[in-house]
Structure formats: structure tokens, C-alpha cells
Image (spheres, grey):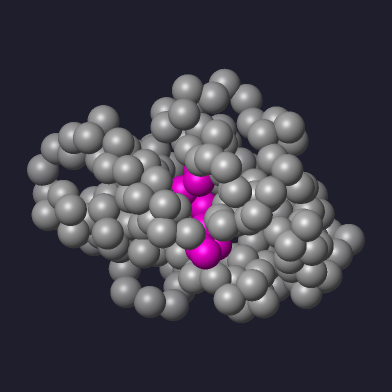
């Protein structure tokens, strides 16, 4: 099977974005992450933040904002601004999936996030990859990289993992994410980012 699309799903702090960029560079494919949100927002005529919010539960977004306020956590980049008004959740979700499918048809693309491995599950030439690591290792990475304390890091991992399951239920009617939803599962607890990317590239090239 000729691989035209690589769909990478990743857990928080598993370094899936880094793996995806290396894979895209090695294959000469286009790396797509935020572009999905930008294209969907342009089609809908709303801000990217409005579309991005539809991929996350309001409760999790509220908890993150409260944690930032309470703990004075500093992040790079501008703060997220949510557009006023009531979002049409069903239409936005459908729009995100349409953008994913339309982009995938162009071929030679590496997706990261947005549930593309599930959305494109039946697409010929799509290599579905999960990049993950143990909760303990991922929490340690958040402590080292983002300056969170142990409690914050562990909670961030737990919240993110819970949100992943909620995302799959809302977007794909998937009650439980399983390893069999992927063609390749890569554990960056044991593998470096370059090693993980090499495995994905080898699988993509057959």
C-alpha cells in the first residue's frame, strides 16, 4: 500500500508533534496541525479559537483557565480568546472533519491530532499512528518543560487523557480508543523522538 497520508494521534507530552515534524521532513510531506483549525474557521467565518474550543469540553477549558489564574502559570504565545455567542457544535465538528478529509485527498500530508486516524480510518493509503508514553513520564516532561509542579503535571495528564476519550465519543461515536484503531503504536518512553520517527517512516515506506 502506498502511503499518501500519515495520521498521528498523540497523548499529552508524548512528543507526537516532534515525531510528526521529523516524519514530514523525511518523507517530504506537508505537516498539518493548526492548519485544520485555521481552514475550518475561515470556512465558518469565525475565529480559530471558536473552532478550537469545539475540540475541547467547556469544563476542561474552564479548569485550565482557572488553574492559570490561580497558579499564575505563564505560557508562550497570546492568550486564547473565545468568541462571544453560542457555538453550533454539530456544524463545527462536521466542518473540522470535512477539512481533514479535503486536506487528506491532496495527499502527501502528515496530520497531528484532530482525531484524523479515526476520521480517515477507511481511507486507502492512510498510515494511522499513536504516539504515547506512560502517564508518569509524560507528567515528568510537563514538570521539566512547562514548569508545572508535580500535582499540576499529574492533573494535566489525567485531564488530557479524559478529554481524549470525550473527544472520540463526541466526534466519532467511539466509546473506547484501542490500540487496534492504529497501524503502529510508538512508545516514546523507551524510544527517542528520532527513533520513533524512523519507525513511522519505515512503516510509511513499506
In the displayed structure, would residue 189 be above or below residue 126? below
Q: Position of residue 163 (x, y in %)?
A: 52, 39
Viewport quadrant of the C terminus: bottom right
> Which of 147/5 is in front?
5
> Residue at coordinates 44% horizontally, 77% vertically from top-left?
76
Q: How many marks?
A: 0
Work out whether residue 142 can be spotted.
Answer: no
> Which of 38/160 is in front?
38
Asked if residue 65 lies left or right of residue 166, the reply is left
Q: Residue furthest front?
A: 1
Quadrant in the rendering for residue 146? bottom right
* 113 magenta-colored: yes
Asked if residue 37 lies left or right of residue 21, the reply is left
Q: Residue furthest right?
A: 190
> Which of 160/16 is in front?
16
* 43 magenta-colored: no
Quadrant in the rendering for residue 86? top left
Residues in magenta, as a range: 108-116
Work out whether residue 129 can be spotted.
Answer: yes
> Residue at coordinates 79% horizontally, 63% vertically from top-left?
202
Q: Position of residue 132 (x, y in %)?
A: 73, 52
In the displayed structure, would residue 55 be above or below residue 112? above
Q: Position of residue 183 (x, y in %)?
A: 73, 43
Amino acid at each position: 500500500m502506498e502511503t499518501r497520508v500519515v495520521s498521528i494521534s498523540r497523548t499529552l507530552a508524548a512528543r507526537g508533534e516532534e515525531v510528526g515534524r521529523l516524519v514530514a521532513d523525511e518523507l517530504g510531506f506537508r505537516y498539518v496541525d493548526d492548519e485544520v483549525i485555521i481552514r475550518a474557521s475561515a470556512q465558518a467565518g469565525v475565529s480559530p479559537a471558536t473552532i478550537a474550543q469545539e475540540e475541547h469540553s467547556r469544563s476542561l477549558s474552564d479548569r485550565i483557565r482557572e488553574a492559570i489564574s490561580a497558579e499564575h502559570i505563564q505560557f508562550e504565545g497570546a492568550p486564547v480568546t473565545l468568541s462571544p455567542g453560542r457555538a453550533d457544535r454539530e456544524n463545527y465538528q462536521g466542518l473540522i472533519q470535512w477539512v481533514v478529509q479535503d486536506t487528506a485527498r491532496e495527499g502527501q500530508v502528515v496530520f497531528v491530532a484532530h482525531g484524523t486516524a479515526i476520521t480517515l480510518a477507511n481511507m486507502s493509503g492512510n498510515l494511522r499512528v499513536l504516539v504515547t508514553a506512560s502517564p508518569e513520564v509524560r507528567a515528568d516532561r510537563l514538570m521539566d518543560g512547562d514548569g508545572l509542579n508535580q500535582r499540576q503535571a499529574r492533573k494535566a495528564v489525567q485531564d488530557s487523557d479524559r478529554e481524549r476519550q470525550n473527544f472520540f465519543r463526541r466526534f466519532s461515536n467511539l466509546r473506547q480508543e484501542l490500540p487496534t484503531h492504529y497501524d503502529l503504536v510508538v512508545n516514546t518512553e523507551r524510544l527517542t523522538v528520532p527513533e520513533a520517527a524512523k519507525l513511522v517512516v519505515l512503516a510509511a515506506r513499506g
